[in-house]
Structures are given as structure tokens and as C-alpha cells.
Amino acid sequence: MARNLRVLFVASEAVPFAKTGGLADVVGTLPDALKDVGAEVRVLMPYYGMVKQGKVPTDVVAENLEGYLGGTPLAFNVRTPASGDYPFYFVERDEFFERSQLYGTPRGDYFDNLERFSFFCSTILPVCQNLGFQPDIIHCHDWQSALVPVYLHHRWQEADVLKRVKTVFTIHNLAYQGLFSKEKFPMLGLDWSLFGINGLEFYDQINLLKGGIVFADAITTVSVRYSEEIQTPEYGYGLDGVLRTRASSLHGILNGVNYQEWSPENDQLIPAAFSAAKIAGKAKNKTALMKAFNLDPKLEKAPILAMISRLADQKGFDLVAAILPELLAQDLMVVILGTGEEKYHRWLAAEAPKYPGKLGVKIVFDNALAHLMEAGADMFLMPSRFEPCGLNQMYSLKYGTIPIVRATGGLADTVAPADPAAGSGTGFLFSDYTPEAFAAAVNAALKAFKNQKQWRRLMQNAMSQDFSWERSASAYLNLYKLLLAGQD
């Protein structure tokens, strides 16, 4: 009997151990879905401070292995969860990963991120050798792991354990590229000939993401629309030309949702379960949400608009700021949860006291509260400037929380334009990145909300959508097989 494909995920974050965004959700859930379709997946990620302080104890499985920074060998240990329930391995070197955050603080990125993640990438070979794991595919995610395909071509060509391996490089967000001063290039342990137009050079800087794009056997993005958008100057962030040259190896595979965790029928983090057929429980969650944010009980029949997001320009917070006074002049409530750029921390802290009982803000990461917001809100705002995939709009659909989104990337791929009178669609979309277009979409949703019969039909449409991981996992498995057969 043919053995299962062996896949090594290399990534900088994954649930339930460490998370800043959707990357962690994908890396933490896709391996299980791949296992269900016939692949053996292991995940390698750094042993951060937040992993060490988490609820899952770990054991050391290898000590004093050697990675590299430039030409200098540096020792590291490998840990794995003690329970054995997770196929994870953690690279432990406190000098690089014992930090309060993953990549930086609200004031900016850590000064040594190139050193931290080039060292992390250098550990793949010794980890595979020591654990006796010979992968068929190494699947890398974002700039933090982008050096792995480069090292396979230019440092590890003779390594037996990686002899026939193929690489897949997934771009979760092209805006984050791993840009560093060219003076640091020797720390990568690569020949200077690779600092050029056909290598890692980008406007006289090092671009780690470009290395992954150039040297991986296949490139994927997290939605079909985004794979097309990033080949244009508007969304390409200077790499659209490089991506067009690799267009035949570029694939859009939509992210999935773990409905074991994100479904109102079996969500353990919300006060009341509900479904499209038995929707009454949603009202109980709305009451609990109002209490959590100290919203005015007199507004219980008014809609709640929720936003769970990294507080960043990309997520459309300039549009939110532009229309917030107009919004809150109406009978409605807005709740916002997230962390991110310092300017938005300050802005929200200043705005919240102006609208007591109507605007609720929590500048934290709180998974339980995120679940309550999805379950208790009536509408969900995602006015993103761009959105490679987005997961919250898919969570929102399942909870009957109607998304209001910009028609870009994965948002356009997952939300169907609503026609309340016809009883069709699942959400409200706008195209132009302007406050006026955003406000028009919100106002269309608010108008539809007033007709509860039509709104209930819209909720049922939304809750019937299925974006489970099975379809995405099958697409990845097919891509892996094509690569191994030399057909991609």
C-alpha cells in the first residue's frame, strides 16, 4: 500500500500556540484537514515566550542541534507538545524567541528580525536529520520562512534527507515582505551573487519574500481573486512583475474554516447555541455582548456592528474613522476588538468616551470575546483596502452576522451581494475605497435590517454557506502530487 505524503509546514505562528493573524489559523488547522485526505503533516515553528507560557506543556526531543547565522553555528533545542495531540515541533533558542511579542511591539518591528528568522530557516535541515523525517513537500508560509526554498537550492543541495523534496510557498499577505538593509546580507549565509534582480535584491534592499517567490517550486495565495490581484501594480507592492514571471506556478486556494471551533451550534465559548433553524439563541448572545461592552440596554432592538481586526491601515480603519460620527448619530452600536498600530490605539481610546453606551472598544486579543462578538452582533465590518482571504467574514456568515465588506481578494470570493427584496445573497459589498462607498454599503444593510423578514432570509442564506477545510485540503494535496510528478 502506498504511504501517505509527508509534508513539513514551516511557519512563524500557529494556533493554539501563538497568533497575530489569519496565518496562525491556517497553519494550526490545515494540517488536520490534510491528514483527513491522506497526508502526514508536521509543523515547525519558533518556541516563543507565549508558547512557553501557554497551556500546553512541552518536552525536549532534541538538544544542541546546530543552525546557522551567516557562517556562525548556533545551538538550539527542539521541543514538542507533551500530550502528543499536536504534530508540532518548536525551535528553542531564547536569544531569538523569548520575547513578549512575535515580530515587534506597537512601536515597531524588532531590530533583529532578519537574524531571528534566517536562523529559524537554517534549522530545517538539522531538524529533519535528527528526527528522521524525510518530507516529500516543504510548505512554507510568508516571509519568515521564505529562505527555506533559497537554502534548498543554494546550501542544502547535497543533503540526502531533502534530496527529492519539493517546495510550496504560500503568500498570506504580500504587503509584509521581510525588507532589510543589504548590509545584513552576509548574515543569510548566501553568496553575494544572489543579491541581484534574479535573487533577493529589491530596490537595493534584501527582500526575503521575493526569495520564496523566485525559488519555490509552486506559489499559492489564500484566495483565487488575490492570486490575480497581486499580479497588478495596484496590489503587487513592487513584486507584480516577479509574480507575473511565475504565473504558471501561481495558484489561488481559498482558506477554509474550522467549523468545530467556529459554529454557533457547538461553540463552547458563547452563552447560547443557535442555528439557522433555531435562531432564538442569537438574541441571548446579543444581550451578553451588550453587557460585555457596557452598551445601553435601551438599544437592544438596534443593530450591533462588530469589527475584530488588526488595527492597521490595510484593514480600512481610515474609512471607519471617516464615517464613525455619521454612524453613531443613528440608533445603533459599534464594537471593536483588536490590537495593532499605535495611532489607532490612541484614536480608539479617545473616541470611546465620546459615545458612552454606543461605542465599545477593547484593545486586546481575546478569543472568547471574539466568539461572543461573532455570535451576538448583527453585522460585521471588513472595509479592507486589500484582503488576501479573510476569515472573519466566513465566521460571520456561519453565525448569521451579515458581513459588510469591500469587494477585494477573498472577501469578494466568499460574500455574495445581497438583494434583500429578492431574498438572495449573503452580505453587502462596495468597490471604491472611499468613505462614501463604505457608508452607502452600511446604510444599505441598516435599511435591510428594518425588514426583519427579509433580514432573517439573509441570515439563513449566510448560515448555509460551507467554507470547510476539506475542499481546500484536497486542492493542496492535488498540487503536492502534481509537483512530485513534475507536472506543475
Image (cartoon, helix red, strand yellow):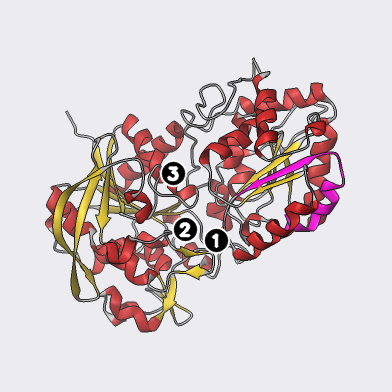
Q: Are marks 1 and 2 in contact (CB under 8 Å)?
A: yes
- Work out whether 14 lies above or below 263: below
The foreground one among 185 and 199 is 185
Residue at label 2?
247
| Magenta run includes residue 323 | yes
The foreground one among 373 and 438 is 373
Residue at label 3?
26
Q: Left or right of 54: which side holds 344?
A: right
Q: Is residue 131 visible?
A: yes
**Marks 1 and 3, the one that precedes in the sequence:** 3
**Magenta stretch, residue numbers:** 319-337
In the picture, the disc for residue 231 is 1
**Marks 2 and 3, the one that precedes in the sequence:** 3
Give the residue type at disc 3.
Val
Give the residue type at disc 2.
Ala
The foreground one among 475 and 293 is 293
Q: Name the residue at 31% across, 48% down.
A: 483
